[in-house]
Amino acid sequence: MGVEQKLGNLGVVTTSLEKVVNWSRTNAMWPMLFGLACCAIEMMAAQAADYDLSRFGMELMRASPRQSDLMIVAGRVSRKMAPVLRRLYDQMPDPKWVISMGDCASCGGVFNNYAIVPGVDEVVPVDVYVAGCPPRPEALIHGILTLHEKVRGEKLRDWA
Amino acid sequence: MNHVEKAVDSLRGALGPAFVGVDVFRGQTTVELAAGGLQQAVRHLRDDPGLDFGFLAALTAADRWPAEPRFAVLYQVYSLAHNVFLGLRVRLDGASAEVDSLESIFPAANWHEREVFDLFGITFRGHSDLRRILMPYDWVGHPLRKDQPQGYEEVQFTFNFDEIDRRKPYARE
Amino acid sequence: MGLTQMDITVDELKHLVSDRALQGETMLLNMGPQHPSTHGVLRLLLELDGEVVVNCIPDIGYLHTGIEKNMESKTYTQAIVMTDRMDYLNTMGNVLVYVLAIEKLVDLDVPPRAQSVRVILTELQRIASHLVWLGTHALDLAAMSVFLYCFRERELILDVLEMCSGQRMMTSYFRPGGLWRDVPPEFEPAVRSILELMPGRIDQYEDLLTKNPLWIDRTRRIGVISGPEALRAGMTGPSLRGSGVSWDLRKAQPYSGYEQYEFDVPVGSNGDVYDRYLCRMEEMRQSLRIVEQALRNLPSGPVLSGNRKFVPPPRSELGESMEALIHHFKLWTEGFSAPAASVFVPVESPRGELACYLEGDGGPKPYRVHFRTPSFGNLQALPQLARGHLVADLVGIIGSLDIVLGDVDR
């Protein structure tokens, strides 16, 4: 703190490495295009002009899992799709987070039958659940900001 | 309605004993056929220039377990020129659930028959590629049959929340 | 019966690919379920000779939700919620076909105001669905700004839907016998403002794309199918009308009062991707025409049928009339019963012919519900359309068919 008081006018800031790393992770988190069903349309609406996701650093959605950090599971996961989902999650490099968007991904939603996996947390570990059927784009943005808060509280050794 | 009545009479004449019956409900006609006469009937409907039913709109099935005959395969054909549709129904036993494929007459029947095979287990003789289409490749059973369960999981309320939580297979990293 | 072993051996699938693939001359490529251009979870097995598609085998079922089986365990009114989620871009249309089937099965009347509002909302939903189609189709063919413009207009329509029902997409607004509740007073000015704004915006999209030489190069003479071929393959909707067959269920078998409105049905001539694009753009304009007529002649009156056996009485009556209380009790505990018969009701969704086969059994739950969905029929024709084209054209063809995987897999 003493250093900052002396060098304050020169535009120098001191902080911890953790904070810088977490700050950079939250401000440039690239989501992976994983829209499955109806929630995907609301995710696309959140990305489009009215509710802009680019202002949170998510300028584009990467289709390739190797180049993305965040998997937003948007939509219902059927039993045929579940192994594909797990494989894509495994292909993403660390650090990676998962938002389960919508009711079907969080808990099976309206459907309770043989074909839908009741909750995507049976397949991948989830960080934030966003409720709604489908959640409004503002709800998704709230979920993303909650994830940012969670990331800001992470320690470096979580992903080391 | 006239064209539909004309088609029904024409079918009755062409099929003979394979024509089982006709029922009209809320202005919609369904002709019931024996399984053996299906291909002949559909070919007659399509090729007869006076009838001209050239479009297969829907192909599905219903399961009436435990009543016999168990399955009913349902078809809807359209005549675009005369703007009418006609329903056809073929009843099948549970033990011998086989019927002729319409793929050679209407190529549009390809995926519809695969779906009926996948969900009900009715085989279509003469189909070029009868395999599962909607369920995973290694699924056992035919889900839409009435003796198959819904497959639901118990709903979590506060009184059984912890118990279900312990049994739920959460994914690990 | 059926395949029960874990691995599928090559022998069982050999008949799907040509001999050249088995000898290694052509390449088998998997355009997987997660792909930006497949508009959902569609898996395509491509057999490629260089860049030319020799064969393309669609593999569907990655979004199979078991809606038809699930609806058998719910009452007729409870099952309305599930129909919304089938074709998620045409939610009003799905509910409309199911509710029309119920009304036909139990012979229930619908007041004229409810029919007009149904038409207005279904046509607005058609415009919204075509906007998403245009946005994603253009995005696939690298016209990215159209995507942002289309979603901006779609927000206006979603605001109207939210105003009526409280939900942007899965509204469940139509009920057997009419609507859930009457439209609020802000509905009419909002729809009028959309009617004033949209023609200019559609002109903007046409300015960007229709005479654009890049767009024409990428869409002309791609994915050509003739009218009779398309009919044989089971295609319906704008994909069929682009090939010259004028078949629109709103004109041929009118439902919900469509016979009173004057509108044209655009028909293409070449059957390629460009003609299908032009058909859908013109359909948006015709939908605006229908909405304008319906709004101008909107009759006043109730929005729910008076038949208390199927339609719940208003809450104000419950304190006054014993029959109203009994009807309310029966409808809420058991639900209404339908006769043991079957009906087949087709409507025109933005993708083609959407039909509901509904069979009752005398009880309060549907015995068998089957939805004949348009994308299922249209996707069957994809191998035929894609043969001989380049992989980049395949993306345009899939976009022009306007498939929604929720529709295909149910």
Image (cartoon, coloured by chain):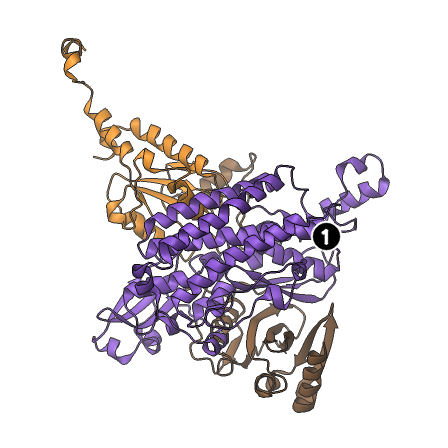
Chain colours: A orange, B brown, C purple
Q: Say whether residue B136 is visible.
A: no
Residue B123 versus residue C336: which sits nearer the camera?
A: C336
Q: What element carries label 1?
A: helix
Residue at (20%, 35%) from the top-left corner? A160
Residue at (22%, 26%) from the top-left corner? A20
Q: Quadrant of residue B131?
A: bottom left
Q: Circle 1 sits on which residue?
A: C112
Residue C154 versus residue B88: which sits nearer the camera?
A: C154
Q: In which quarter of the image is residue C211?
A: bottom left
* Residue type at the position of mark 1: Pro
Chain holding disc 1: C
Task: Check the image and report above or below for C57 versus B52.
Answer: above
Task: Check the image and report above or below for A131 versus C198.
Answer: above
Residue B46 versus residue C159: which sits nearer the camera?
A: C159
Callout 1 crowding tier (Cα within 10 Å): few <14, some 14–19, many ≥20: many
Q: Say whether residue B52 is visible.
A: yes
Residue C60 versus residue C66: which sits nearer the camera?
A: C60
Task: Check the image and report above or below for C328 versus C386.
Answer: above
Q: Is C385 left or right of B108, judged from the image as shown?
A: left
Q: In which quarter of the image is residue B63?
A: bottom right
Residue at (33%, 60%) from the top-left corner? C215
Residue A67 location, x and y as percent? Answer: 24, 46
Q: Is C322 left or right of C174, judged from the image as shown?
A: right
Task: Check the image and report above or below for C157 versus B66.
Answer: above
Residue A75 location, x and y as percent? Answer: 44, 48
Residue B144 location, x and y as percent? Answer: 56, 63
